[in-house]
């Protein structure tokens, strides 16, 4: 695993990536991509732009996967039409759908190359360091592909043979279908014509149903809008009716207040009452019509909801089919990864064999060095033995000289030993004399002390008597 340190767009350090490929320098990436016939100058790789990155990825997909923008757009349109959905009804432009499909193709290709974190931001705002890492993975894939192209020759031949066999079987199937149709026409021509007529009628009926379904969908949208308008109008009329009821109530209260002050006209009141009753009946009839129309709209909306549920079930089935295709793609990717792992292990085994050969050569060289060291050691041993013999001769000579000089030396040693013993005895005698002298000095000092004490005592006695003796 290769640890690739990167920096994010804010300039702070992120954790290192454990990639399966090495991070290549920009000049090497430029040379390798130009060798694959890609427009990859070093200046644009160091300062990439969204337009250049988009064109570079399109070239990579066209070269390695055979996918180009010229055949991707019609294929997407045909797939949408086959699913019974048009881009106009989905409100999606073909350019945006093609960009989304290219993004998905690029992401799958880079996942196979060992890069799992590719996003749309890498195309819209490309970062030089991330582009360097992504293109390092692409270059590693290109090198691996070029190294193993020869291993795929047998598979290519087998696929060509399978394609030829498929074409032969397809031609045979067409021939059998033609023969079956001829036999059916020869056996019952009227039945075949009726069958074709029935098929045409069914196709026309399906087309009419699809057209009717689209019209119903448009009608559903229109009725939904009208239903919303009706609800808002109904709320407005109810609020207006409440306001008018409140105004009528206030008018009646005002009428009750001013009734004592006016002269009532029964004919006029009867006419006003009739007009108000007619206006009330008209408004009630309009309200009933609106409610009936609302009920009809609710029924239509329920029917359209049922149709929408059926459409959702169909879309769910299409999604399940798409999921199954995605699972098949995942299995294919897993098989490809296993093949790549097998190839990587074979490559590692070759490397180990190469290293074993290197170790064998190193062992041979070590054995040669060991032989040289042994020869040098033998030479040194012979020279050491010669030196040892010379030293032994010198030692024998020195021993003979020692034996000649040993008697006088022994006499001198005995004399020296006797003198040392005499010196020791003299030192001991001296110590004894010193101790005896010290004892005598102590006795003398004690005697002198006692004598001095006696003199002091006698002198003291004479002083007491008043006479001082003259000495």
Image (spheres, rainbow, N blue to C red):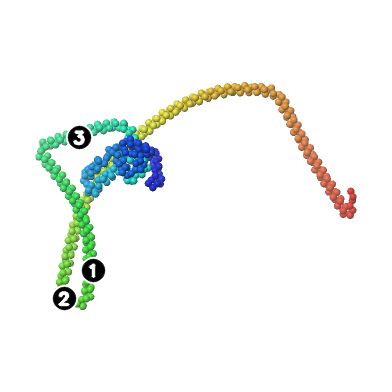
Q: Which residue is mark 1?
A: 246
Q: What secondary structure is found at the residue carrying circle 1? A: helix
Q: Which residue is painted at 21% across and 70% down in the image?
A: 248
**Alpha carbon distance from label 3 to label 2:** 101 Å
Q: Which residue is painted at 22% across and 66% down in the image?
A: 241
Vertical placement of residue 29 versus 406, above or below: below
Location of residue 120 (image quadrant): top left
**Alpha carbon distance from label 3 to label 1:** 84 Å
* Residue 150 rendering spot, x and y as whole percentages: 31, 31
Vertical placement of residue 272 versus 111, above or below: below
Q: What secondary structure is found at the residue carrying circle 2? A: loop
Tag 2 or tag 3, which sits nearer the N-term?
Answer: 3
Q: Which residue is mark 3?
A: 170
**Alpha carbon distance from label 1 to label 2:** 25 Å
Left-right relation of 360 to 230: right
Q: Which residue is mark 2?
A: 265
Residue 20 in view of the camera: no
Q: Residue furthest left?
A: 190
Q: Nearer the viewer, residue 8 or 328?
A: 8
- Mark 3 vs mark 2: give the one in front: 2
């Amino acid at each position: 695993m290769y640890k690739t340190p990167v920096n994010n767009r804010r300039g702070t350090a992120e954790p290192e990536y454990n990639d399966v490929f090495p991070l290549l320098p920009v000049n090497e990436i430029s040379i390798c991509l130009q060798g694959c016939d890609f427009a990859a100058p070093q200046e644009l790789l160091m300062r990439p732009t969204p337009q250049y990155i988009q064109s570079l990825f399109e070239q990579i997909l066209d070269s390695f996967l055979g996918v180009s923008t010229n055949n991707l757009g019609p294929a997407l349109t045909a797939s949408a039409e086959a699913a019974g959905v048009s881009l106009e009804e989905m409100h999606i432009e073909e350019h945006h759908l093609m960009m989304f499909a290219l993004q998905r193709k690029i992401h799958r290709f880079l996942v196979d190359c060992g890069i799992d974190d590719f996003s749309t931001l890498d195309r819209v705002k490309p970062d030089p360091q991330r582009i360097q890492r992504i293109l390092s993975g692409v270059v590693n894939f290109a090198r691996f592909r070029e190294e193993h192209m020869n291993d795929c020759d047998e598979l290519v031949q087998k696929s060509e043979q399978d394609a030829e066999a498929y074409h032969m079987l397809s031609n045979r199937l067409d021939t059998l279908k033609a023969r079956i149709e001829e036999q059916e026409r020869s056996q019952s021509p009227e039945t075949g014509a009726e069958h074709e007529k029935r098929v045409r009628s069914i196709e026309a009926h399906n087309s009419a149903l699809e057209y009717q379904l689209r019209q119903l969908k448009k009608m559903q949208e229109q009725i939904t809008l009208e239903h919303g308008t009706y609800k808002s109008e109904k709320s407005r009329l109810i609020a207006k009716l409440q306001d008018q009821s409140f105004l009528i109530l206030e008018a009646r209260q005002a009428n009750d207040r001013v009734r004592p002050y006016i002269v009532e006209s029964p004919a006029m009141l009867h006419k006003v009452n009739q007009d108000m009753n007619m206006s009330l009946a008209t408004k009630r009839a309009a309200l009933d019509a609106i409610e009936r129309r609302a009920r009809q709209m609710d029924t239509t909306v329920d029917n359209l909801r049922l149709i929408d549920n059926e459409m959702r079930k169909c879309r769910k089935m299409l999604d399940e089919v798409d999921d199954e295709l995605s699972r098949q793609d995942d299995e294919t990717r897993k098989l490809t990864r296993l093949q790549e792992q097998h190839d990587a292990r074979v490559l590692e085994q070759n490397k180990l064999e190469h290293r074993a050969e290197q170790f064998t050569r190193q062992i041979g060289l070590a054995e040669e060095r060991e032989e040289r060291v042994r020869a040098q050691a033998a030479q040194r041993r012979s020279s050491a033995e010669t030196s040892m013999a010379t030293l032994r001769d010198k030692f024998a000579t020195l021993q003979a000289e020692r034996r000649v000089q040993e008697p006088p030396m022994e006499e001198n040693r005995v004399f020296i030993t006797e003198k040392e013993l005499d010196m020791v005895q003299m030192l001991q005698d001296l110590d004894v004399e010193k101790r005896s002298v010290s004892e005598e000095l102590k006795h003398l000092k004690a005697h002198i002390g006692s004598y001095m004490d006696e003199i002091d005592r006698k002198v003291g006695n004479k002083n007491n008597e008043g006479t001082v003796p003259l000495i």
